[in-house]
Image (cartoon, coloured by chain):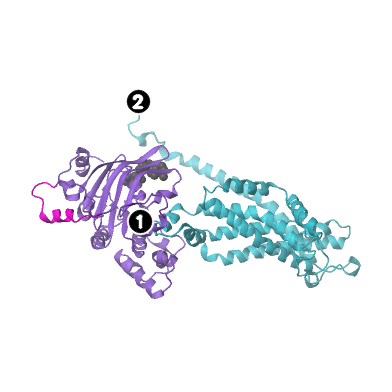
């Protein structure tokens, strides 16, 4: 995959040296080529071509209803479940089209985890079992392994201290923000290589948000992350690259600092500076 | 007309509170009356069964087999055993079939066999129980040349299947889509998500569906006439002709003997209690899912 050209970024003169080396060492872990998603006749996203570089955080921003969730769900074949959804174009993982015939969606999703926009704990399971569900249902039986994995994931998702004394309580007994972190922990337990997060901090207080952002920075050493966010500061803080969507189109994509300081598109600039959207 | 300056200015003073209170009381009274109308026949039926049945039931009635009226009339032990055996087998067969069909309809909505499954199930549901008995009579009893408990259980299973199927499909549909999505996003195969995450979330409802089917089948007499055939003797072997409480009730209620008519009430009460115990057991077994 190394001969694949990194996304052409025209760095403004005077850009720091470190950013340049980062750009040169980049390898797209995922990439979409002319990806469109339709719901029946209605267009969700249209003709999106965009890389998601390995070991970086890519932020997807744009006004409500512009297709961020739609795009994200196309990256791990989540639309397979929606009968009316139709995919055109390609989504590559390590250069291989995940929509090619014969590709097993289960294998794809095992590598590409997802945190959903709305918290969705398993309603009948305890806090512990919610977090352990992925491993348990894949056949992991060893108690010590499960215990260790649950504690690690819950700690990473900054929920451990709040729930360590009531791991046997139902997952549904948690508050909205706690459920959101529970779902982050659940996704982390199976150690995905790519993590898709749809507004993972939308229900969190500033302290928890900060902790999750720190987690992303820590995680990206091993994991490739795409995150949808409505919070411009968050996109600026955690992401290396940003894609701006508008009405189903990818309007602009580039290194976050470039897109934020020197956007090429007038819509992007208006959105980022808060004059629109 | 000029638009009002603010919404508050067009809301009546006091917000119609008096009228709304009166209206509230009227509706409440109507609701209570309606409930009474609906519930009272039910109570009347149960009450009649209870009062008449209690007068007949005693230890001998519960533990003896059939005896002629001239010898005291005996009891319904053979019918209790037959009812339990046939209905449990029917629950096993019809429960599994209905459950599997319900899962297919709910979880694989695009499966090509589903339209046929749905049609057959609806057809079966609408068909009189008598006809289901005749079908088994034609394909089992005639070729083998004998009535048997197995044939009876099969007839009851046909009655059970569409009820369980519809109930299963219905409760699985109530499990939010997000549960399936969350499971699949963890990299689990679809069957694993269904078995370990979706079905457990619907257990209480599935069991309720099984109980509904069981209760319905336990009350059927007509289809057993040409299949189980009825019997006056105790036997634990479904290969033989078998009695059921519903059959006993039907036969005894039509006999001129007062004793037999009283025994029909007794059998009705026992059947009612059996169904009640079964549903209480089911509630108890699924208590942690509620
Ligand atoms: N299941 C669906 N069926 C039909 N249309 C859908 C479906 N899901 C999304 N859409 C439509 O696709 C468009 C994009 O929706 P999407 O959820 O991707 O937006 P979004 O960018 O994630 O918005 P938000 O920021 O509010 O979450 C919207 O117009 C939406 O109405
Ligand atoms: Mg969204």
Check disc 2: other Cα within 10 Å, few if <14, some if 14-19, many if 20+: few
Q: In the drawing, what numbered circle is on residue B2?
A: 2
Residue A275 image-quadrant placement: top left
Pointer 1 with pointer 2, Cβ within 8 A: no
Q: Nearer the viewer, mark 1 or mark 2?
A: 1
Rounded to the nearest whole Å, what is the CA distance between mark 1 and mark 2?
Answer: 54 Å
Quarter of the image for the N terminus of chain A: give it. Answer: bottom left
Number of marks in picture: 2
Helix, strand or loop at label 1? It is strand
- Residue that sits furthest to the bottom in the current view: A144
Q: Residue at x 57, y 53 (%)?
A: B102
Q: Image check: A235 left or right of B197?
A: left
Residue A114's tag is 1
| Position of residue B110 measured from the top left corner of the image (x, y, whole percent) | 52, 47
User: Which residue sits at x=82%, y=69%?
Assistant: B65
Q: Check residue A23 for magenta coloring.
A: yes
| Residue sitting farthest toward the front | A3
In the rendered view, does B52 fall on the left or right side of B72?
A: left
- Magenta stretch? A11-27
- Which chain shows up in cyan? B
**Is residue B132 toward the left or the right of residue A76 in the image?**
right
Near-viewer residue (B194 or B55): B194
Q: Nearer the viewer, residue B8 or A253?
A: A253
- Chain bearing tag 2 is B
- Residue A206 spot, x, y in % from top left: 25, 57
């Amino acid at each position: 995959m190394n001969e694949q050209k990194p996304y052409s970024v025209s760095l403004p003169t005077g850009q720091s040296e470190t950013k340049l080396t980062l750009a040169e060492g980049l390898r797209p872990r995922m990439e979409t080529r002319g990806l469109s998603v339709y719901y029946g006749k209605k267009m969700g996203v249209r003709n999106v071509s965009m890389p998601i570089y390995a070991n970086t955080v890519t932020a997807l921003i744009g006004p409500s209803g512009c297709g961020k969730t739609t795009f994200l769900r196309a990256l791990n074949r989540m639309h397979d479940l929606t009968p009316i959804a139709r995919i055109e174009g390609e989504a590559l993982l390590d250069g291989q089209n995940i929509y090619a015939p014969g590709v097993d969606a289960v294998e794809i999703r095992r590598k590409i985890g997802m945190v959903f926009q709305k918290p969705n704990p398993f309603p009948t399971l305890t806090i512990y079992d919610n977090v352990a569900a992925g491993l348990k249902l894949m056949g992991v039986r060893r108690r010590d392994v499960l215990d260790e994995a649950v504690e690690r994931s819950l700690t990473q998702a900054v929920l451990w201290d709040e729930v360590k004394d009531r791991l046997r309580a139902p997952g549904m007994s948690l508050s909205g923000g706690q459920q959101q972190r529970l779902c982050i922990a659940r996704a982390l337990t199976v150690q995905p290589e790519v993590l898709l997060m749809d507004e993972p901090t939308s229900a969190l207080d500033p302290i928890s948000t900060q902790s999750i952002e720190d987690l992303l920075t820590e995680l990206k050493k091993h994991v490739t992350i795409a995150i949808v966010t409505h919070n411009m500061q968050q996109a600026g803080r955690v992401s290396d690259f940003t894609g701006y969507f508008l009405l189903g189109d990818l309007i602009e994509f580039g290194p976050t600092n470039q897109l934020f300081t020197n956007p090429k598109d007038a819509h992007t600039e208006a959105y980022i500076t808060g004059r629109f959207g | 007309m000029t638009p009002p300056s603010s919404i508050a200015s067009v809301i009546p003073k006091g917000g119609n509170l008096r009228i709304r209170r009166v209206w509230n009381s009227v509706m409440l009274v109507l609701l209570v009356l309606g409930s009474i109308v609906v519930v009272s026949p039910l109570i009347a039926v149960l009450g009649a069964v209870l009062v008449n049945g209690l007068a007949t039931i005693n230890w001998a009635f519960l533990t003896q087999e059939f005896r002629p009226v001239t010898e005291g009339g005996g009891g319904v032990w053979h019918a209790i055993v037959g009812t339990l055996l046939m209905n449990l087998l029917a629950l096993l067969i019809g429960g599994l079939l209905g459950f599997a069909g319900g899962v297919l309809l709910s979880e694989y909505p695009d499966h090509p066999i589903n339209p046929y499954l749905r049609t057959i199930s609806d057809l079966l549901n609408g068909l009189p129980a008598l006809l289901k008995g005749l079908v088994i009579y034609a394909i089992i009893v005639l070729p083998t040349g004998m009535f048997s408990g197995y044939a009876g259980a099969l007839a009851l299973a046909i009655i059970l299947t569409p009820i369980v199927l519809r109930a299963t499909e219905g409760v699985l549909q109530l499990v939010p889509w997000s549960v399936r999505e969350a499971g699949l996003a963890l990299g689990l195969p679809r069957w694993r998500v269904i078995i370990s995450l979706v079905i457990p979330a619907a257990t209480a409802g599935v069991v309720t569906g099984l109980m509904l089917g069981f209760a319905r089948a336990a009350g059927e007499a007509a289809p057993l006439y040409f299949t189980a055939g009825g019997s006056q003797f105790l036997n634990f072997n479904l290969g033989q002709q078998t009695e059921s409480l519903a059959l006993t009730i039907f036969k005894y209620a039509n006999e001129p003997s007062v004793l037999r008519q009283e025994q029909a009430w007794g059998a009705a009460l026992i059947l009612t209690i059996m169904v009640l115990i079964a549903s209480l057991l089911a509630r108890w077994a699924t208590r942690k899912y509620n």
